[in-house]
Amino acid sequence: MRKIVGLIFIGLVLLLPGGLKILCLSLEGDIDNSGKVDGQDLILLGRAFGSAEDGERYDPACDLDGDGLVDGQDLAVVGMNFGRSLEDDEEIGVIDRVFGRSGPPYVADEIIVKFREDADPTDVGDFMNEEGGSAIPTHEPVDFTLIQLPEGMDVPTAVSIYNQNPDVEFAEPNFYRYPAFTPNDPFFRFQWHFTQINMEEAWDTQRGGSSDVIAAVIDSGIRQSLPDFAGTRFTPGYDFVDNDNNANDEGSDGFGHGSFVGGVIAQTTNNNFGVAGIAYRIRLMPLRVFPRTNGARVSDIIQAINWAVGHGADIINMSFGGPSGSNAESQAMNAAYQSGVTLVAAAGNEGNEDDFSGDVDYPARYDVVLAVGATDANENLAYYSSYGPNLDIVAPGGDTRRDTNGDGNVDGILQNTFYQGQTGFFLAQGTSFACPHAVGVAALLLSQGVARDPDAIYTILRSTATDLGADGRDNRFGYGLLDARAALEGLGLNH
């Protein structure tokens, strides 16, 4: 039995009645019945490998899928469970919770203020002292002041007071950004989402990318110790939550969101284990802005963007969003864009909400950011995906309500991550996971020799997308569905 681990993260949407089935985990691959899948099982499988049911070397205990052959499928089962023991197995099912933009919209006692360049520092200091505010130090250089409000002053009042000062260019809340997400189960044959964007043919042109290319993942961090990151390259990142150099994914609400996103981009591939990633030879830069609970502060996101730019990132993945724009965030995006960094963000998961604004979330809505919506397995706009005049393209985001292709699993995006201490392979839905598909293809384009110019990348991804919906660009699909093969065709071979 395959391990089926299910979660649903759908913003503010209620979980569907009935949810998914709870299935027991079973320890497959324990050929010698020792209670653990280990080297002995590999030795036994190796002896019988390549044999058929009527052959001398055939051992039915090694034929784990019962097809009459001891082959790669059986090796994959052992590989998936290698190192596991019976005491590791327990029953896991749907988590009956709602995740997404359910927290506060902004930090309760902080605001972001941009003072005018010609403002007199003495006047600024006197004004802040008068209002009782104090500057909060930031790890990275920023062109705004993060202000701690005095006790008893609320954010709307502070924003109003500061915006009335002629020395202030703008004052705004320190908004939270929230992941938009959902998870469940195993292997490449179940990664229909890569087939949808013609990934196999794209790999014929550019197989995995170049280690010279760096994709920054601003998220909950990345757990590099996950089994299917064993061969993935990483470059140092930073944790803006704990303010240290260890950007390990500790989970956002217990879920390895950043690890999942990083897996879509560059999970270890062609290693006889688990699942594939799109640009698996590039380097990932983990930047942690999401704490274990609640959302990410815009001030931390801005610092992460600045860190990424200053430490050589070529692309930034932003699988999060919120309904309000931020001047400070917009300026940071513009600066990154001007420095040649490609910016890609999730459109948001509010498309079926009563209060849907009719456009994508921020930061996807900024002009310099590529906004990515989500499709289901039938190439329809996913029921939850946000859309509107600022949508650029769509990519596979999944729909865990159904099994369209009849493979026994719901139509989620599949990667290796963790939930509440359980490591495994999970199926997920959300524009959070559509976004890294575009980042992975962008990384392959850069590896292929496309100039380090976000406009060049955006133009290729838009112009080669498969047109869906109304002819030409429309508000539901943007320029169409991401097509990795078409994007890479004609750019020369570079295996």
Image (tube, rainbow, N blue to C red):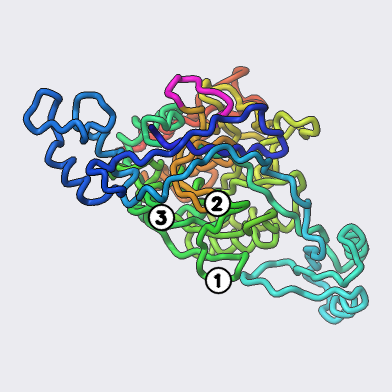
Q: Amino acid at mark 1?
A: Asp
Q: Secondary structure at mark 2?
A: loop
Query: In front here: 245 or 327?
Result: 245
Answer above or below: position of 464 versus 38: above
Specify the quadrant that holds the C terminus: top left
- Residue appearing at x 33%, y 39% in the figure: 28
Q: Kindly indicate whether the residue at mark 1 contacts the one at mark 3 (C-beta within 8 angstroms).
A: no
Residue underneath mark 2: 420
Q: Dot 2: few (<14), some (14–19), or many (≥20) neighbours within 10 Å?
A: few
Residue underneath mark 1: 244
- Quarter of image, res 462: top right
Q: Amino acid at mark 3?
A: Arg
Is 403 within the magenta?
yes
- Residue appearing at x 19%, y 31% in the figure: 60
Residue 23 location in percent, x, y? 49, 33
- Answer with left or right where residue 472 lies relative to residue 130: left
- The span picked out in magenta is 398-408
Residue underneath mark 3: 283
- Answer with left or right where residue 53 lies relative to residue 311: left
**Tag 1 or tag 3, which sits nearer the N-term?**
1
Residue 411 location in percent, x, y? 51, 28
